[in-house]
Every structure is written in C-alpha cells, then in structure tokens.
Amino acid sequence: MLPRGRPRALGAAALLLLLLLLIGFLLLGGDPECERLEPDGRAGDLGCPRCPLTPRVPSDGRLRGASALDGDPMAGLWDHNRSACDPWPQLPPKCELLHVAIVCAGHNSSRDVITLVKSLLFYRKNPLHLHLVTDAVARNILETLFRTWMVPALGVSFYHADQLQPQISWIPNKHYSGLYGLMKLVLPGILPPGLARVIVLDTDVTFASDIAELWALFAYFSGVILLWLDRLRQVGWEQIWTLTAQRELLTLAATSLADQDIFNAVIKEHPELVQPLPCVWNVQLSDHTRAEHCYSEAADLKVIHWNSPKKVRVKNKHAGSFRNFYLTFLGYDGNLLRRELFGCPSQTLPEAEQLQRALAQLDEEDACFEFRQQQLTVHRVHITFLPHKPPPPRPHDITLVAQLSMDRLQMLEVLCRHWPGPMSLALYLTDAEAQQFLHFVEASPVLSARQDVAYHVVYREGPLYPVNQLRNVALAQALTPYVFLSDIDFLPAYSLYDYLRASIEQLELGSRRKAALVVPAFETLRYRFTFPSSKAELLALLDSGLLYTFRYHEWPQGHAPTDYARWREAQAPYRVQWAADYEPYVVVPRDCPRYDPRFVGFGWNKVAHIVELDAQEFELLVLPEAFTIHLPHAPSLDISRFRSSSTYRDCLQALKEEFHQDLSRRYGAAALKYLTALQQPRSPA
C-alpha cells in the first residue's frame, strides 16, 4: 500500500465504489499492517486492534461524507483510530435482489463471464440480476446461454456497448481492452434511473464467497445509498470525469490502464473520496502486485482477480494454487447450478413453466421414460465458443453443418483440409471437456487458422445423445444461404465445396426451384487409404473393393434411392423419388425444416428429416460429380444399445409412430404415403 496521503492506483470498479457506490472488487485496503480481516469481521492479530470496515458514527447519528458531493467532507467516514471493532454488517435478507454489472465484449470475454457467473451462483443465497453491457457478439452468445441455462432467481438485462462508445472514443487508450476498458466511466448513464445499488465486476475475477457479503457493505451508507446515483446525475458526474480527463491528457499521450488512469486523476484531486476495503476482496494476481501480503495473513479470501494480460498464465509465486481454484469453476457442471432459492418468490419464464409441466406429466415407470425425458431436456448452449469471423456475403455460399462429441475431435483437422468453406459444428461436451476442446484447437495450427469454422458447445445432460437437437443448433447458426447437412465422420471430396456452389448457380435454386441436392455417400472399412481426387478414382476404388456404397452391407435401403448404378454414368443432375428409410446427405437452403428433436440416441433421426423435406415438396436431385466418404470408427454407445436392447428398439418404434401421427395432422392425406416407412424393418438410420 502507498503511504496515506498519496494517490493510490485504483482499479476501475474501485472508483465506482467510491464515487458511484457501485461497489466493485478492486478495493484497496488501508494501512499495510492492517489488511488482515478475520471471518467475524475483527482485524487480524497483526498488532492492529481496529476494524478497517467500521464507519465512525458521530453523536448526531450522521455518517460523515453522506453529502460529499454537496461539499461535506468524507474524511471521517471510516475510523482508523478506534480501539474496538463493531460487528460485521448483517447480510441482506435472503430474498433481497442483488444487482451486478459487467462489461463484456467478444468471444473470449464471454467465456470468462461464464466462469465468473458460476462462482457467483455457487456461493449465492440471494436472487441476482445481471446488467451486461455487451457488444453484438457477446450479446448474441450470452442471450442464448442464459436463455438455455434457465437458472432460477437469475435475471439478465443487456445494454448496447455501441451506445456508450461515442462518449469515450475521444480518449486515447493503449490498454489491451480498448474502448471497453473505459465504459465503467459512463455506466450511470446507461443503467436504469431507479437502480440504486449495483456491484460492478470485471470478467477476470472468481468469487470465493457469497456476494451478499460484499453487498452487505452498503449498510455503511444507510440512508444515503438510495439517493447516491441520483446525486451523481444531479451534480453532473459526466462533466466531472470529462474535465479531469481532458486536463490529464494535456500531459498524457494516452491512457495505459484504460479507465483506471482517469479514476486515479479524479482521486488525486479528491483524495477524501477514497475509502479502503480489505484486500481479501481483491486478491490481485498480476505481475507486480503484493498480493502475498494479503493472502499469507487472511483467513478467508473473497475474490481472486486475474488482473494481468496473461490472466491465469501469470507468473506468480502461488499462482498454481489459485489457478486450481479457478479451474474448479471453469470445469464445474453448470447444470448443477440450476438450484431453487426456496422461500423466495421469483418470476418463472413461460418456457420454464411449460417445461416443468411437461416433465411432471412423465411416467417414470414408462419403459421409454429416458427417451421422453431426454427429448424435453433444455441443454445449455454456448454458440461461437471460439473466435469466429463470419464469411463475406455470397449468393451461393454453403456452410457444412455437423455435430460431434469428444470422441470425434480427431476428425476436425482432416475435415478442415477437405472443406475450405465455412462450417457450423455443434459439440456435445461437459464443461470440463469444453476446456479440453479449447486447448485442442489452440494447439492445432490447422484449426486455429480457420476463423470461418463456428463451434457451438451444447452441454451434456442426460443418458441419450440428443443428435437432432445438436444438428438444429448448428443449423440455426449457419450464416450462408445454403447448408450441406453432413456428419462428422464423413470426408467430402476435395472439390465438393466449389462444385456445390457452382451447381446451385447452374440449377437456379432458391426462389426459382425448391430442391435438395443429394451428395452420394460411400464408405471405406480401412483406417488408412488414399482419398480419391476425382469421380474416376473413386469408381476405381469402388470396383477394387476398397470402397462401398454407404451401408451397403448393413442397411442398403438407407441410400438405395440415390441409384448408384445411374450415378456411375451420369453427366448431369437427375431426380430421384423419396422411398421409405431414405437418408441421403443433402444441400438445402438455410431456412429448411429443422430436425425433429424427439429422435434422440440412435435411429431414424435423418430419415425423419428427409420425410419432412419430401412432405414440403423439395425435389431430390443427385449431383453427378459429388461424393462424400465415411471413415470407420468404433460403434457409439447408442448404436450398441440399439443393437442389444429390444426395449430401446421398441421405444424408437413408438417415436416413429408418434412422428407419423404428427405428420398426418400437419399434412393430412399427403402424409399417408409415409406410413409405409413404419411397415419396413426397423431402421438403424
């Protein structure tokens, strides 16, 4: 700590504590020898018998500094000369709503917010409302995440960061956070006028205690806090910091610590505004802090702050121990945080109420209970988990859409070599596996170089693989006019991307023609083989027995309507008719029908989608030069259960019958022809 009387290097949220009473976490302690605080609120045994958080209440009962902006001094607000400690402030009532504000921009910061929120939810006992100031990227990600997370007693409001940029863009800034590092200066102007108290956090902190303990510190401003933001608006806070910044920039070329430089300048002019909080609320793990003086003495740390550009990779004497604490929340199953706050009234979203009613109607004695439960499960979804650069708009562009789990990650590099165009991939992972996937991509020169591949993490929940829900997530995030609906264990021909785009243009698809372009599928039973570079080479491999038409040995009717004999000789696209259990890989417009989410696990998931396309009168056109090849792999758990369990197959049959009933309701007599699909042997599609 700096000696008393000298300006301190405050963090952004510190000033919001001191000036805005938006209590933050960069809260610096008082004297260096008095920074230890015991859990009961007493000062630690460091030869300092006073309590650093106890306000001095004069005989008139008024807290000094209550009207500091009206000219009242604040120097007497905190007593550094008491000989005894008052009790630690009482926690807020368990149902009091606590408000938290966070500035977040971009893909990486969005991931950081999730880890922060996990730590908040793990310890919290109060309802929370998050006020998120975001750019368009972060908002798109976090809106989807919180909508699908469905955490009880957690509200979220979003504010457009773009609206704040004109107010701060005139400030030269060298900090790595860019303009977003300056936005806390103007938070009072964007938060709701009636909001009296809010805790402001950076994305790189991890809570180690209930945030209500921090909220309780507002008690020291009793009778004032409800008016404080109004006072700031009345006295013109924007003018205060703007004039100060303009004066500082006369001698300072640019800010290097973003808003902290401006906060420091304001504090320098108004040192009486600085009020310390214990260091346990801001254990800073950057390169040049003296955090060890805090955590070596404190018995109960509250907030860990990775305030270094290196973040968790910072070189610190005890960084490993703190890193393990951070990793605990990074890999923690967020589904376990969907905990009710019993006794606290909360407004349940209509979607959540509908889901609860549907789940309550399920019969746990039903042999197909796990199928019913899985198809109702709302999975947490983190779209664009990694940085992604959308492709430039092109009228005939195509996105490859697929889904995968952890055991198929090895397919990604080779797929990127075969498909140079954009991809939208849904990954079914646990929270811990999502971090393994992140490291896998970062360590791969091939994958890390592809900014046009969008990865969407769907968090694992339930015993069955939600294959069609995954496909729908990836399909919904495709940004090109057309999509190639594939599977992750298929490799497209090297030339397929360009060939498909040219075919779409030549066939005048879109408004003129409603068609699904069929890409013939083949397979090899060999783990190593030379991939054909042309149709002629593929036919040679087919004739030599090194390639087969897909599932020729196990389920030929799944692809027989493609008419491979005709394809061998074809020079132009040709139309084929739908047939029972047909499941080709197709190119369709992005707004095509979605997959039926009732089909979970193994069986009929693609078949049902092709039925839907045919019911909506899509032509099925086979492309003469297109092909994709399936690579061998170990059977999945779901296909093993399908093969070994008659109950599993019976449940799939029940789903097929329900699907047909729904089809009849929607399409009437036109759906009768699909009844033949139920009269065929049970398909493994």
Image (spheres, helix red, strand yellow):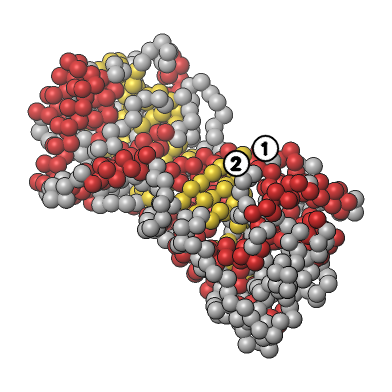
**Residue 573: quadrant of the picture:** top left
Task: Check the image and report above or below for 19 versus 611.
Answer: below
Q: Is residue 495 visible?
A: no
Provide the secondary structure element on which disc 2 rests: strand
Task: Check the image and report above or below for 323 versus 526.
Answer: below
Please name the residue shown 25% across and 52% down the image: 463
Where does the image place residue 324, in percent across and percent down from the top left? 49, 69
Which residue is outermost to the right? 250
Please name the residue shown 42% across and 19% down the image: 503
Residue that mark 2 sits on: 159
Task: Check the image and report above or below for 437 versus 210.
Answer: above
Q: Amino acid at mark 1?
A: Gln
Check if mark 1's residue and mark 2's residue have beta carbons within 8 Å.
yes
* Cα–Cα span, label 1 and label 2: 8 Å
**Residue 609: quadrant of the picture:** top left
Provide the secondary structure element on which disc 1 rests: helix
